[in-house]
Amino acid sequence: MQLKPKYLSLLILVLLVAAAPLFFPSGFYYRVGALIFINGIAVTGMVILIGYAGQISLGHAGFAGIGAYSCALAPVYLNIPPVAAIAFGAALSAALAWVVGRPILKLHGYYLGVATLGLGILISMVLLNEAQWTGGPDGIAVPDLGLRGLLRDMGLRVGAGELWYWVAALVMILGAWLALNLFDSPTGRALRALHGSEVAARTIGIDVPRHKLHAFVVSAVYASVSGSLLAQMNRLITPDVAGFMHSVQMVTMAVLGGVSSVLGAIFGATILTALPQLLTVFHQYEHMVLGLVMILVMIFLPDGLLPSILKRLKGRNEE
Amino acid sequence: MSDLLQFLLSGLTVGAVYALLALGFTIIFNASGVVNFAQGEFVMLGGMATAFGIAAGLPVPLAALLAILGTAALGVALNALAIAPARGAPVVSLIIITIGAAIFLQGAAGLLFDKQIHRYPGFSGEAALRILGATILPQSLWVIAGATLTFALLWLFFSRTLTGKAVLATANNPLAASLVGINTRAIMALSFGLSAAIGAVAGLLVTPITMTAYNTGVALALSGFAAAMLGGLGSPLGALVGGLLLGVLEALTAGYVSSQYKDAVSFILIILVLTFLPQGLLGRKSTDRV
Amino acid sequence: MSALLDISDLGIAFGGIKAVDGVSFAVRPGEIVSVIGPNGAGKTTLFNMISGLYRPSQGQVRLDGRDITAMEPHLLARLGLSRTFQNLQLFGDMTLLENVMVGHHLRERAHVLPDLFALSSSRRSTRASADNALALLRRVRLDKGAYREARAMSYGALKRLEIARALALEPRILLLDEPAAGCNAVETAEIDELIAEVAASGVAILLVEHDMKLVMKISAHIVVLDHGRKIAEGAPAEVARDPQVIAAYLGQHGQDQVLHAER
């Protein structure tokens, strides 16, 4: 029986997530894994925005910031339980994306890049400057989600790293499932069509602004949830989460891995998250290596790492 | 009143730097269609290299000249190694390439120089001049004069020399330019070198006022980019107007509203301008052909 | 029968130059009307105005009596206006099947939440679109390559693919911009047959085409443009004998073709 590509992708993802801990030399790797999955969630949103709809954003870290600070602030000031704060942040991000997206998404290419960049920077500026709420540049503590306590009451003792590994994996796989659903759906086809030719998309009845906006909002929610989980895992959050470099990181991970496919983007997130964590020896050269990798991959493997690797493998099989 | 003058003076100083940054963006954008996010690194390198030259005992003019030449060479190398090989790549790829270059240069500067904050004394001393109750550093005059001179020289270059006209022709229509025998590759290299040199000039002029460090490039690039977009990407005059306008607005915001949110001005402005005037204040309008 | 598409005094100027100036004509259901004229006569510009891509500076476009001048293209599609492009506007990364499936967009009612969660409503419309799209691909004989990416196909195949996508909208009026350009004789004959067949099903067709043989053979009515103005219109035989048309456009060579086609 032929497995549909969607289920094949999910199966690969589940197997890798489940098998990886078998090779972990120490508990530290659970944290690295969790970080990979948290970034994996954000880049899956990038796949929908950049890969499907062909729209760039250099400001999505702003939404991650909203998600993260919602988890820190909503439980304290609004008496919302920490779990619900994730949903609260997602709703807030979606609302902001909805309002700002309409005018911004009329822009194309670099202009869209700069407008979104400005949006992200404005959000991070607020987080940085409103210190009486956000703690300013030092960051702020995040109330405990209470998951470990809950598990302990049920008689399960799990390390924090291990717990977050599985929680983040679960959310990432759920996110991947949604994005893969979208790909082969009326909305997904409309997005990919307007990516290919906006003019043609309009003449076949696609409401281009509406669909772009949907992609923008959905990807903002992904970024927000990613930021929320990061905050909950670290229990401390700083404005860096909303910074320009984090936005760049999201786009780079996705495009480097292969932004047209969910698996590719998550592959990119894996590499760019794991390398700096594992190669601490090279800490000094981290920036240079990162910059070099970005340039080289874009020049020599413009489709991204995973699609290029797959193409090469396929080519070899056919010979 | 003297407050206002004070804010205008400091705004013009910063604005002159933004205008030079925006000019650098504009030259590269016109030649290659690429928005170079590494533009701020040129400014940083100009400042850092001059600081290290002076610290090594070189006379200021020599240190400055070496910084400009070195940065210009780097600009040419950036084009040859990272931009030219990616010709025709989608905008997202080009954005990642130039951001990658910015990160690389930042890392290299941190390693090659150091990670400290640097400055050197102003070229004409540090004693503030008084004008109508406001004060201005002599170095501010250097910045403003340097920017004015750069714009004037560039205007002469583009309007009076054959090479300058070739650059304009290439910006207008690369294919036609190459058909009439213009070496568009050389023009690209020239544009990157020129743009990097302009960035270095801005950096070495402003460092005595603002100081510099290996990681200041990204923020500079963003402001300069905002200025270029504000004036209209692709228009040198727009770069000048956008840069000065942005500098003054930032200074006024810092003075009358909140110094914490002065950087917000550029981005609020840019979102508004792009939304309501997508071509910027002085940019050209383009029509899609189907 | 009254006109389905009614164009009156339509014109547009770019930077002071009138690309199209005061053009009027009408298309009835099931009728094939061709717009001909030398290169630069304003044919594609006319199409772009009718399909809402350009905003006319004068005149009106009516569909079924309703003023649709400068309406958003996606709303025009909803009213049953569909078109193809002279220089192909296809979705290269998508398969042939998907290219035609998006043509069904208006009937799919794409909603982002059901689509994210793959609710049965979403899966049902995908299945329905796929079935319809496959039937259309069969009709333009492209069903064998249904799962190949559009970018991998030949130019002639893509021309037919674009027609299939336009037909997926189930239009009431179809605008075809040089459907046979770049096609060989066999492909042209196929397209000819397809157009006639579509018109026979009651769809009004407005055609821009350089292949005079094709135009003369299938058009009921021909509108001739030159320098943005209508210089003649009428039945093919009439137009072909119009001295102004011959002078402006057809020339001796064209007239030979016309006579050949009539025979």
Image (cartoon, grey):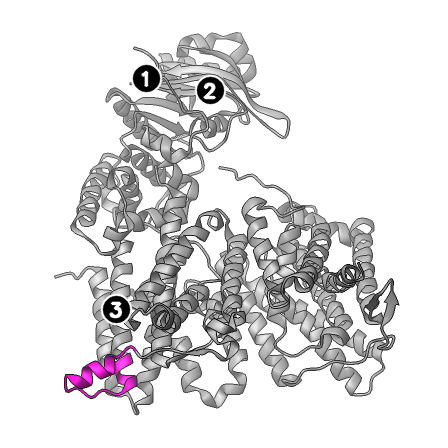
Relative to C132, residue C224 above or below: above
Q: CA distance from mark 1 to mark 2?
A: 21 Å
Q: Where does residue B91 sit, x and y in percent of width and height?
A: 51, 57
The residue at which mark 2 appears reads as C60
CB-based contact (under 8 Å), mark 2 and mark 3? no
Q: Read off the chain for label 3.
A: A
Question: Label 3 belongs to which residue?
Answer: A173
Q: Quadrant of residue A142?
A: bottom left
Residue type, label 3: Ile
Q: Is residue A129 above or below residue C38?
A: below
The residue lying at 30 percent from left, 48 percent from top is A187
Q: Please determine whether, in this image, residue A89 is positioned above or below residue C115.
A: below
The residue identified by callout 1 is C31
Residue B115 location, x and y as percent? 63, 84
Q: Quadrant of residue B206?
A: bottom right
Q: Is residue A315 visible?
A: no
Q: Is residue C73 left or right of residue A180?
A: right
Say whether mark 3 and mark 2 are on the same chain.
Answer: no
Q: Residues within 10 Å of mark 3 (few under 14, many from 20)?
A: many
Q: Give the x, y percent position of residue A243.
A: 50, 70
Between disc 1 and disc 2, whose residue precedes? 1
Residue type at the position of mark 2? Gln
Do the CB atoms of the residues marked 1 and 2 lie less than 8 Å apart? no
**Discs 1 and 2 carry the same chain letter:** yes
Element marked by disc 2: strand
Few, some or many residues within 10 Å of mark 2 (<14, 14–19, 20+): many
The answer to if A316 sits in the magenta stretch is no
**Part of the protein shown in magenta:** A145-164
**Horizontally, is C57 left or right of A192 in the view?**
right
